[in-house]
Amino acid sequence: MKNYIVITPAYNEEDNIELTIKSFLKQTILPLQWIIVNDGSTDNTGSIINSYADKYHWITLLNRENGKWPFGTHAVKNFEIGLKAIKHTNYDFLVKFDADIDIDREDYFEFQLNQFKKNIKLGISSGITYYIDNLNNKKIVWHPSWRTTGAMKMYRRECYENMGGLVPIYGWDGIDDLKARFNGWETTTFYELEVNHLEKKRDFKRKLDPKFSLKQGKSFYVRGYPLFFILLKTLMFCVKIKPKQAFYFLKGYINSHFNNVEQCVSESEKKFIRKFILKRALGLIK
């Protein structure tokens, strides 16, 4: 069962990467290879990783200059760089794993490998993240079970190749689930597999930036989401975040439409996505 490869993009993670590595070392089933792509870190990230790569042959450190790619794109680009450093051909699963995660369960990977063995249609799986807020409260970052977590995803190799790999855009970690399902695979988050996303709080600061909201709106257009969903999302942003962010989110989507921004889905994939989203809105898919 030791037949999975892990790829981790890392940038300035000196405060977190050692906890991530130590939680890997405790796993009941270790990967064939763990490739950590150091994307031009300016802190001690590289030296920390290197100290472990010297001890464990299955840890590979790749040092490179920072790619300066946009947020979202950078994760996929570094993942693709990691793919080129795989030393093995006899693996069945690929894992994209963030550099700021502390895994709670020692059988985190073994559990998922068993689920893949039980269900031959399972194409993508993940656990669920949480973070500790400023009041020391544990906050689960919830999402529906079909939607896997971008911070740590396990792909059946056949599914990954079947959907043509990952799309280098903001929102790559949502469109992969839909592309997999379009191709007949199942996608599942296992809520019993909790991990501590150590720097999750950074995301909430980013979401208050209007430029980020513009990118979000554009991303939903690029992924082929229907207008009715965007309007519902805009209303939700008005209530849960701020009207200003909602405005820029809607603007990003509409501007992309009128500027004929290229979409990352085929017409048949877009039809599938829009039917899927409609079923979700009607409560037919949880």
Image (tube, rainbow, N blue to C red):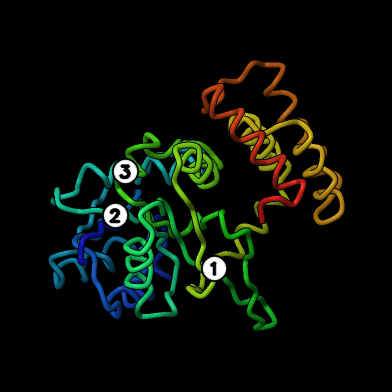
Q: Disc 3 and disc 2: Cα gap in Å?
A: 28 Å
Query: Given the image, on which type of amino acid does mark 1 rest?
Result: Thr
Residue 198 in the image: state x and y as whole percent.
51, 70
Neighbor class of circle 1 (other Cα within 10 Å; few <14, some 14-19, many 20+) is: many
Q: Disc 1 and disc 2: Cα gap in Å?
A: 21 Å
- Residue visible at 71% across and 30% down? 253
Q: Is residue 135 left or right of residue 146?
A: right
Query: Given the image, on which type of amino acid does mark 3 rest?
Result: Glu
The answer to which of marks 1 and 3 sits earlier in the sequence is 3
- Residue visible at 61% across and 20% down? 261
Residue 5 in the image: state x and y as whole percent.
25, 57
Up-down relation of residue 147 to residue 74 (above or below)? below
The residue mark sitting in front, 1 or 2, is 2
Residue matched to label 3 = 65
Q: Nearer the viewer, residue 266 or 263?
A: 266
Residue matched to label 1 = 129
Q: Is residue 262 left or right of residue 96?
A: right
Query: Given the image, on which type of amino acid does mark 2 rest?
Result: Phe
Q: Nearer the viewer, residue 46 or 235?
A: 235
> How many marks overall?
3
* Residue 42 seen from this side: no
Residue matched to label 2 = 93
* Residue 235 seen from this side: yes
